[in-house]
């Protein structure tokens, strides 16, 4: 099962990044692998289902996900919806930790299994690189659209340790 765990310091406020990542319907504007994404069922103010169409080279697949956002905890969790399409299992989480300089430590976990073994094999080969690319795309878009905070150079190692996060996951 392809899995990635990435941590990145981003020079935007945690609340701003949380709102930005929560706005899933805008993903097709800046993530070239997603050709369409729409909210299909609003369950509450903090819970909804969405359907995405992912295109890679000649392959196009759709899948449904169940998304829970927690503004107080600055956390987003995504799981496979009942009718997940090409996805057999999915867990994705985004945690936004405020740093002392006003910037954010973003902790991303992605764990996915596809129904089609050939696609699973292709995904496994490129999963870590693709996950880093997606985090880079989010950071670039955030830097273009959100207010920058914090110093360019900032040592957050003590804050990382206090949060109990693995420094080997920092990209």
Image: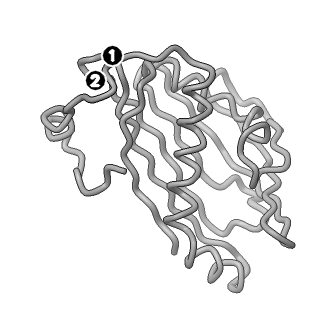
Q: In this view, does 5 lie above or below 51?
A: below
Quick check: 73 left or right of 117?
A: left
* Label 1 Cα crowd, 10 Å radius (few <14 / some 14-19 / many 20+): some
Report if the CB atoms under discs 2 and 1 are less than 8 Å apart: yes
In terms of depth relative to the viewer, which is nearer, 108 or 145?
A: 145
Q: Look at the picture and state if 15 lies above or below 120.
A: above
Q: Which residue is labeled 1 in the image?
A: 102
- Give the residue at the far front of this rendering: 152
Q: Quadrant of residue 119?
A: bottom right
At label 2, counting other C-alpha atoms closer than 10 Å, the crowd grade (few under 14, some 14-19, many 20 or more) is some
Which numbered dot is residue 163?
Answer: none
Residue drawn at x 22%, y 51% is: 167
Image-based side of 131 in relation to 114, left or right: left
Q: Residue at x 59, y 32 (%)?
A: 21
User: Pointer 2: what residue?
Assistant: 99
Q: Where is residue 13 in the image (x, y as percent from the top left)?
A: 43, 18
Horizontal side, residue 112 vs residue 101: left or right: right
Q: Where is residue 113 in the image (x, y as percent from the top left)?
A: 60, 71
């Amino acid at each position: 099962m392809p899995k990635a765990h990435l941590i990145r310091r981003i020079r935007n406020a945690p609340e701003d990044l949380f709102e930005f990542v929560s706005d899933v319907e805008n993903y097709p504007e800046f993530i070239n692998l997603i050709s369409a994404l729409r909210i299909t069922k609003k369950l509450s103010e903090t819970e909804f289902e969405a359907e995405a169409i992912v295109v890679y080279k000649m392959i196009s697949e759709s899948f449904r996900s169940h998304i829970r956002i927690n503004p107080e905890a600055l956390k987003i969790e995504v799981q496979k919806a009942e009718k997940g399409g090409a996805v057999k299992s999915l867990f994705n989480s985004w945690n936004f930790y405020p740093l002392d300089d006003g910037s954010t430590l973003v902790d991303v976990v992605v764990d996915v299994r596809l129904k089609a073994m050939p696609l699973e094999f292709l995904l496994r080969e490129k999963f870590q690189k693709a996950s880093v690319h997606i985090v880079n795309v989010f950071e670039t878009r955030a830097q273009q659209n959100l207010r920058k905070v914090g110093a360019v150079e900032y040592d957050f190692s003590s804050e990382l340790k206090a949060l109990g996060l693995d420094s080997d996951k920092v990209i």
